[in-house]
Amino acid sequence: MKTYKVFLEGALCFFLSAGAVTAEQKMTNIITCLLPGEGSKEVSFFIDNVTKEINYNFKRNGKAELSVVFNEGNKLRRFKDSKMSVTYYGFKRGKYSYIIDVIEGVEKNEYTMSFDIKKNEKIIQSSDCLPSSFRSDNIISEYIINVPYMNEKKFVFP
């Protein structure tokens, strides 16, 4: 009986830990920008491995203040400026625009990032992401639309 009980406890631990791993693997982190200042602030984009939707979160002290889901009806915008080696990811919510800039460095896997908020197309907040921030090397999703460059006078991103 004691052997049977130990076996059941071991099986239960295995299945609980396997469930935790599966839950953790449901999302793939593609961008995380840790912001300086008082308290912890984090901007992140994750791809749901099941639905393939992109999830955006802005968190302050671990609590989500803004969450947005990007899917077929609401795509994340991306603009690549090859001359400046910068890739922009952004979206609008009413009068506000939220933009992550990924600036490629000279060496492979060398980059810096910043996070901007615009109101009525004017920057109201701009912060460099902390060095411990992260961006995936290969960000591919059917829920990202690549924005073509127009002339400088008419180009507004996102």
Image: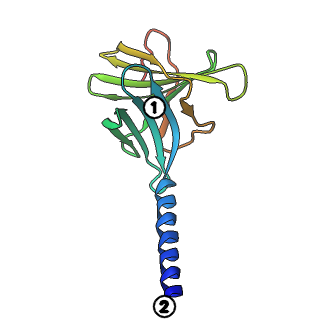
> Closer to the camera, 117 or 21?
21
The relative height of residue 46 versus residue 148 in the rendered view (above or below) is below
In the rendered image, residue 90, in percent from the top left (x then y), is placed at 43, 28
Left or right of 79 in this view: 95: left
The quarter of the displayed image where residue 58 is located: top left
Label 2, secondary structure: give it.
loop
Q: Give the residue at x 48% y 38%.
A: 144
Which corner quadrant of the image does residue 65 belong to? top left
Is residue 108 found left or right of 91 in the rendered image?
Answer: right
Q: CA distance from mark 1 to mark 2?
A: 61 Å
| Residue identified by numbered label 1 | 77
Single out the mark in the foreground, 1 or 2: 2
- Furthest residue in direction top, as rendered: 153
Residue indicated by mark 2: 1
Mark 2 and mark 1 in contact (Cβ < 8 Å)?
no
Residue at 42% over, 31% down: 43
Horizontal and vertical percent for residue 4?
Answer: 51, 87
What amino acid is labelled 1 in the image?
Arg
Within 10 Å of disc 1 (Cα), the crowding (few <14, some 14-19, many 20+) is some
Q: Residues within 10 Å of mark 2 (few under 14, many from 20)?
A: few
- For residue 105, side relative to residue 126 (left or right): right
Q: Name the side, left or right, on which 105 lies relative to 23.
A: right
Q: How is the image coloured?
A: rainbow
